Amino acid sequence: MKSKGSQRWWKLDNAAKIFPSSTSRHNSKVFRFVCELQENVDPQILQAALDQTVERFPIYRSVMKRGLFWYYLEDSTLRARVRSEDLPPCFPIYPSIRRGLLFRVLYYKKRIILEVYHALTDGAGALQFLRTLVCAYLLARFPDAFVPPYPTVLPDASEWQKQADSFQKYYEKPAGRRLYLPGNAYRMRGSRLPKNHLAVLEGQIPLAKALCCARERGITLTELMTAVLIRAIHERMSLRDMKKPVVISIPVNLRSYFPSKSARNFFATIQVSYDFSRQEDSLDAVAAHVRETFQSNLTKEYLRARINTLCALEHSIPLRLVPLPVKDIVLRIANLLAMRGVTSSFSNVGKVSMPPPMERMIRRFSVLTCAGVLQACACSYGESYVVSFAGPFREHEVERTFFRELAGLGLEIVLTTNFPSEGEVN
Amino acid sequence: MRYCEACHISIEGSIEYCPLCQSRLSGEPEEDSYPILLPGRKPYRLVVRILAMITIIAAVVCAVVNLSLPQDGWWSLFVMAGLASAWLSLGMTIRRRRNPMKAALWHLGLVSVLLLLWDWFTGRRGWSIHFVLPVFYSCMQFAVAIAAWVLRLRPSDYMLYLLLCVLAGFLPLILLFCGLLQIMYPSAVCGGISVIFLAALLLFRGSALKNELARRLHL
């Protein structure tokens, strides 16, 4: 802290601006990264590693505050404490009665768990934090296993680069305003689990075999998984439901398209829509359609247009002048409308890498998110590709069809769940 | 590792039935990857519920007695309004319990409204705007300033709330200048205190105040 008067603060980035208003009990906007080690986690060493890591990412020390027009992040003196996992996955972080940090670090047996409120950062940003944390933990836990130069995963980025809002950098005013309402997509329904419980199913798949399966069809792994997911959702639809398309929203890490080292949000979403009343339901047909959508949408021009649309709202003067309580209501309604156009989402965080000497100490990484509906996330580490489903429902028909179809493709799947071993959660 | 013959999928943990198709699993159980979570308890919930029940019983008893003895007028309405006011205040305190400054500010607003309503419905004698509100606003400024000092809060945690309390202290002064008041000295004293507080804020915490406003008002 420089002086009492000049406390640091940050405006929310463009993507984050909608999150505080649209967070609800069922939709905590919290996502979780898990790093599973080969042996049990030592909480004291983890705490020391966490202290070190937070030093490197000052924005993780911030708390959320309400201004007259917008929410903002403000530096705090709170210290992040590691806790034994004592909450359901992706338990709400903000708003809470006690003003707290916007992330938490938990541990359970062999797992180090990082849960982050989406307003703070996106998957890629949080992964940067977790990798730094795990790296610091392993260095302290096995001091003899490493020789200088000690491995590091810290990005070559200045503090300024890490805190930058990259949306602002790549925004240019669009020529015409394009505000459109999404069409209605098929929405999954079912009986919900009580409270804020989230049912998690993680399926570990051998990466090489999965890649083979995808390449045989001439598509990427993400495209294959999206196609299988669309088909799995189709299984539970009635004929009446099929009047509406299945729309899968896919977050895209914009850092891969626009140079940025931001540790904050920098993503956009593309949507794959599949209409089973008009299109065939074979895997090949769905996969071909998914591939087509990916290829036309994953271009710099298309994504730039997405950034411009996303940022245009934030830059419109009349909207900016609306006081926050009113904005809360408007953004909440806008979010509900946008959600009507999406069936589910599939976010692939991609390949997680750790320095080679550490690779054998880590069993796997996985990721999951809570967004009010059934969602799938995936990441790969070493030889394993983990697809995680997280949803608020008691039924798991989509997951069953999804994993059975993958098993049918000849992939060996290892499932992990958080369902209790006896009886139901109630 | 356990195995589901129907799904051809292996399953980690000690779960007995397949999470996908609920058929019985074969193979040896292992330790679970997730903890078994018991539902958390909310310790104060029962206390609040008991208080609510007592309140309802008290209100009903008053109403019944009032109806049985009609010659006394409608005094039970005052009891009920009093209980409702107390509950509003209690609810607000519980909601804002982690942020005393915010709780104080919300109380400032709530108590002002309640005082005006009580004054209005008990004969419009104007005791609220003449005496109670000026005294209340003066006390609130001292209370918030002292609390901030004792709790060693950082400027960002008290500045806005203190500023708003000080500005509230100017309200009686405005009424005074509009000629709406017959008795002047409580409002004049309250306004004076507010001016002194505002001057002190600007002189000694000016830059912190400016920073706080820049944060809170950014577009």
Image: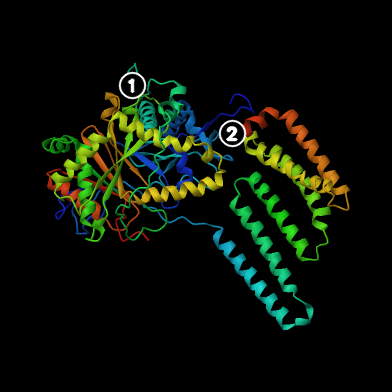
Label 2 marks a residue whose chain is B
Residue topped by disc 2: B215
Q: Residues within 10 Å of mark 2 (few under 14, many from 20)?
A: many
Q: Residue A279 vs residue B88: left or right? A: left
Residue topped by disc 1: A151
The residue closer to the viewer here, B184 or A394, is B184
Identify the image quadrant of the N terminus of chain A: top right
Q: Nearer the viewer, mark 2 or mark 1?
A: 2
Q: Is residue A220 above or below residue B118?
A: above
The residue closer to the viewer here, A38 or A364, is A364
Query: Is any part of residue A88 visible from this angle?
Result: no
Q: Residue at x 57, y 65 (%)?
A: B49
Label 1 marks a residue whose chain is A
- State yes or no: discs 2 and 1 in contact (Cβ < 8 Å): no
Amino acid at dot 1? Pro
Amino acid at dot 2? Arg
SS state under label 2 = helix
The residue closer to the viewer here, A38 or A379, is A379
Identify the image quadrant of the C terminus of chain A: bottom left
Q: Residue at x 72, y 78 (%)?
A: B66
SS state under label 1 = loop
Q: CA distance from mark 2 to mark 1?
A: 39 Å
